[in-house]
Image (tube, rainbow, N blue to C red):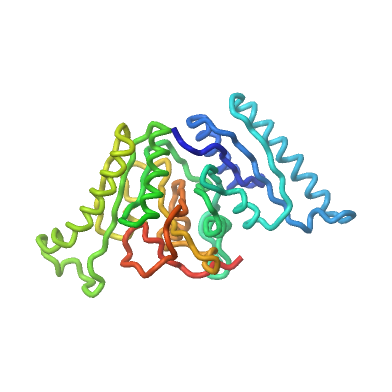
Amino acid sequence: MSDISTVFVAWNGGAASEAALDWAVERVCRVPSDLVLLRVVAPSAVIPGMPGREQFDAAAVETLEQARVVRLRVPDVHVDTRVMIGEVVPTIAQHTGPEVLMVLGSDGPSRHALVRAPLAVRVVGAATGPVAVIPVGRPWEWGGVTVGVDDSEESYDAADRATLEAEATGQPLRVVHAWLQPSVILDAGAFDEDALDDLQAPHQRVLDDAVAVIRGKHPTVEIRAECVRGFPADALLGSRRRPAVIVVGRRRLSHRRIMMIGSVSRDLLYGADVPVMIVPAVTASVPSPSDGSLGEGLVAGPVSG
């Protein structure tokens, strides 16, 4: 059984938030938990005597009506609303935590990504619990859970979350470890098969160790393990069957790096056409240089708000 007690949906009536709500409703039907529609209204909309006050009131009424519709759709689920005043990203992040799953919709890559990152990227950078990002306009199905692993603590935190998701929803778990050949030699053809086998051997051990830990904790979950030579995001997206969700870890960040995310998370949030869940580390340290292995949480740089 999942340890998620509440599923929050960041909802504003747009197409992306509708996609997030649809996914969240399906999940709470499969895995019982409370469902909360979170609506964040900018402070300027609640100044007494200003026209913006009407916007706040309208947002509250719209959110309550949407909750009523959801209750009719899933009468056995406890559905609540929370309409908050504040800046969007920090307010959403304040509602995240280890026992909360925050669900956001995503319109896809921003045309101004170098200047302003999409909402989902900024929330993930500040979240203290798992965040699921659901792409709009893409069909999704319950086709299993995919998780990226390496030998880091944050990777094992992500594997725990992914396994709980698979176990609670009755889906198989695909465990992936990606590795790259030494960057000093760019041509893969320069390595013969024996050399590639030698390079892969330690990566295969990392994968085997991770799978052994997962099986020890969750012996009933169906597991398919893959050691893949290639870029992490490509390896995670490379399954023949579309997964219900891809799960990756994110390192615990220092205060000055709190709005940064790893390169794998960033690539998936910008490029994945399936739901992606980013899990912040419980015990991991500040990021350090990486060789590009999956789950390393590379620092992508500050995300402007």
Q: Residue at x 42, y 33 (%)?
A: 168
Tell me if 177 is positioned left or right of 137 in this view: left
The single residue placed furthest to the front in the displayed view is 283
The number of numbered badges drawn on the structure is 0
Q: Residue at x 29, y 39 (%)?
A: 216
As displayed, is residue 67 above or below residue 235? Answer: above
As displayed, is residue 216 above or below residue 299? Answer: above
Viewer-side residue, 262 vs 59: 262
As displayed, is residue 34 above or below residue 259? Answer: above
- Where, quadrant-wise, is the C terminus in this rendering? bottom right
The single residue placed furthest to the top in the displayed view is 76
**Residue 13: percent from left, percent from top:** 66, 44
Picture quadrant where residue 7 is located: top right
- Where, quadrant-wise, is the N terminus in this rendering? top left
**Residue 295: percent from left, percent from top:** 37, 57
Q: Residue at x 87, y 56 (%)?
A: 50
Viewer-side residue, 198 vs 99: 99
**Residue 217: percent from left, percent from top:** 33, 38
**Residue 293: percent from left, percent from top:** 31, 61
Tell me if 252 is positioned left or right of 196 in this view: right
Tell me if 11 is positioned left or right of 280 in this view: right
The single residue placed furthest to the right in the displayed view is 49
